[in-house]
Amino acid sequence: MNLFHFIDAFFSDNAHWHGYDGIPTRLAEHLGYTLEALGLAVLIGLPVGLVTGHYGRGGNALSLIATAWRALPTFGLLVLLTLLYGFGLINVMVPLVVLAVPPILVTTYEAMRSVDPSPVDAARGMGMSEAGVLFQVELPAALPLVLSGIRSGAIQIVSTATIAAYVGLGGLGRFIIDGLYQRDYEKVVGGATLVAGMALATLAVFWAAGRFAVSPGVRRSG
Amino acid sequence: MNWDRLFDIPSDLQHSWLGLVGLHLREALLPVLAGLLVSLPLAQLCVRFRWLYPPVLWVTTILYAIPSLAFFVLLIDYTGQTELTVMIPLTVYSLVVLVPAIVDGVRSVPQETLAAATAMGLGPVRRYVQVQLPIAVPAIIAGLRVATVSSISLVSIGSIIGNQGALGNLINDANIYNRPELAVNAVLSMALLALLADGTLVVVRLVLTPWMPRRVTRARTSAKEV
């Protein structure tokens, strides 16, 4: 009875592919949580990181905030919010956003700071506006690192969205948590495999996005 | 919320609050230490053989993508519902931060410094221990800070697999006994531990690098942090 046996048993059981507790439903829920949380985290982390990185101010304040946010345990926040405010999606979103903002924020800031200053000066000398410098010079050059920050955030969200099931919501964590309570090891392993697969798919998506979005010149020198 | 019972730890945890703190520190810090012991030689190999670095980065990134809960669960088959099941994944996760931090730190040592060390008659081992490693300390500590803080937070997930989460078990109890104050206690205690550990590492860096300027300088490698 090894791991692959369980994985095979889980995926070949037709009952796991249908209904509200089927793999497609749970996968879609998990993807939904992930996209929503990642969207919110990018909305918070990216602009702040870009602007502070562009002006080179507030780096120490940012790393303090990032450390403090990182220190908040995701699982604890989730249960605490659920106990205080009852059942709801917002209780999952807050911890996931708190989890993903620090890597996005700090990496974006560092990426902007590490852009070679001479092209930036040249752009300014040619009369580009501050926004032009930011979006047409600094951001394209910093894009590989910025993407790697968002990638870390995304992977952490995919991994951690499993705990939504602990407070009665859906997602792939459902299989793991239900399986643990039902002593159905096949289900647990199947769920874990699905989450790991989704995390790897996230890596692949970001790799492809990097190939597509990063300018060839930047890719060569990087 | 019953604030009077904030430190009234349920007896099923079989520990006092301080006991849980100790347990939590052990479960969170030993993996980081083990991660450091693994990544030091691994990073040195990556510095020595440049072609090795990209594949090592890929492997650590992919291992990091395995969700903690999934990782714990897969290990139960081999190590049971024990502390070890929580500590092995945390060790593996720390590599993704520590290896790049050490590699970048060691690589940042200027060529002239190395040449000077060689000219003074230092062999490769002494050069590594006395020159490269000390200069890489700020980068290594920057990596250790990220690894430690996230490790302290991740231990709590261990409570889902049979009460192996130290302070995280308080969260589980808060849920099943409907005592939110226990969750408050757990969140604040863990945040406090994380900030204290982070502060300790900053102090360690200041002690180890008396030659650095005293103002707050963040090591370059934090750009690569994950």
Image (cartoon, rainbow, N blue to C red):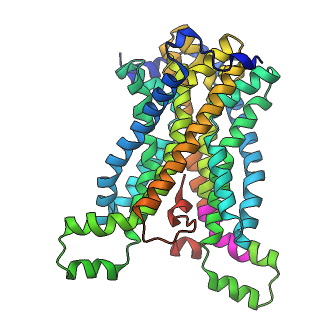
From the top left corner, tell me how far across and down residue B101 is, in percent.
Answer: 44, 58
**Residue A144 part of the magenta segment:** yes
In the rendered view, tell whether residue B81 sits above or below residue A90: above
Q: Give me the residue at 69% from left, 74% from top.
A: A138
From the top left corner, tell me how far across and down residue A26 is, in percent.
Answer: 67, 25
**Residue A107 part of the magenta segment:** no
Q: Give me the residue at 53% from left, 28% from top.
A: B69
Magenta span: A136-146
Relative to A54, B49 lies left or right = left
Q: Nearer the viewer, residue B168 or B107?
A: B168
In the rendered view, tell whether residue A157 sits above or below residue B163: below
Q: Give me the residue at 80% from left, 25% from top.
A: A88
In the rendered view, tell whether residue A111 sits above or below residue A20: below
Q: Residue furthest front?
A: B4
From the top left corner, tell me how far across and down residue B44 is, in percent.
Answer: 30, 60
**Quadrant assignment for the N terminus of chain A:** top left
Relative to A170, B158 lies left or right = left
**Residue A158 in view here:** yes
Q: Give me the residue at 35% from left, 41% from top.
A: B34
- Residue A48: quadrant of the picture: bottom right
Magenta: main secondary structure equals helix
Q: Nearer the viewer, residue B98 or A57?
A: A57
From the top left corner, tell me how far across and down residue B189 is, in percent.
Answer: 61, 32
